[in-house]
Amino acid sequence: GNSVTQMEGPVTLSEEAFLTINCTYTATGYPSLFWYVQYPGEGLQLLLKATKADDKGSNKGFEATYRKETTSFHLEKGSVQVSDSAVYFCALKTASGTYKYIFGTGTRLKVLA
Amino acid sequence: DVKVTQSSRYLVKRTGEKVFLECVQDMDHENMFWYRQDPGLGLRLIYFSYDVKMKEKGDIPEGYSVSREKKERFSLILESASTNQTSMYLCASSTDTSGHYGYTFGSGTRLTVV
């Protein structure tokens, strides 16, 4: 079946460090891939997305590239800030017309000043 | 700015009570969803609706029901609340099945059943 696997957290970094959060997926066909962010006490917000292989999604300094050959969609940021502390969710939606998305379990990021 | 609004941020209910969680979206989206979020388990889909009066079970529907009488409103009902339903509940909506636009989420309702 379809699934998303994220690296377990928490991830703790110092301000201005480089961030990578790994995400791999299993899906039939060519799914769309997403990263969502959840700040403390809030719902999830769409951070970035990619809808086909080799696409790069980017937003707020975060990037992720849709790698079909490795079935991955790793989230990266060159220099994290304290305000990036949040939980990050990788998600996919298959192209088969189903309405629902499949989420990873989330990775908590804590950035220290 | 488009919005999904959940009526309560925090709720405390007693075991056995009937609980209603309300969600309203102003984007004219066809699809609406209820998830629960628990530590270590991520988001699990309870129910979703792709049209008015239409509903489908998600992955964990037991103990829940839903109602969608109008396009903009999707209600989650806990028929008889139990302590294992203590959780964060997230409502979301989307406009299409293509996957290009993602979900829009509400801010969540943290429900505690005592």
Image (cartoon, rainbow, N blue to C red):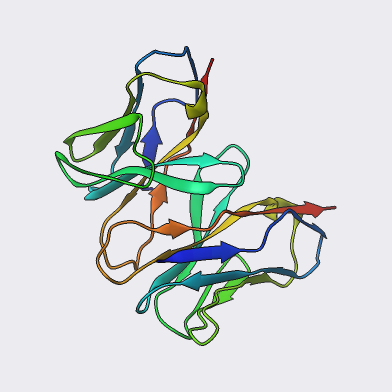
Residue A26 percent coordinates (x, y): 46, 72
Residue B70 percent coordinates (x, y): 17, 35
Residue B112 vertical placement versus A72 (above, below): above
Q: Residue at x 85, y 52 (%)?
A: A113
Question: Horizontal placement of A28 versus B50: left or right?
Answer: right
Q: Residue at x 60, y 63 (%)?
A: A6
Q: Residue at x 35, y 34 (%)?
A: B62
Residue A84 percent coordinates (x, y): 68, 55
Q: Is residue A89 visible?
A: yes
Front-lying residue, A38 or B43: B43
Residue B2 percent coordinates (x, y): 36, 47
Locate the N terminus of chain A by quadrant: bottom left
Quarter of the view holding residue B103: bottom left
Question: Horizontal placement of B56 versus B38: left or right?
Answer: left
Front-lying residue, A90 or B60: B60
Question: Horizontal placement of A103 versus B4: left or right?
Answer: right
Quarter of the view holding residue B63: top left
Q: Is residue B9 visible?
A: no
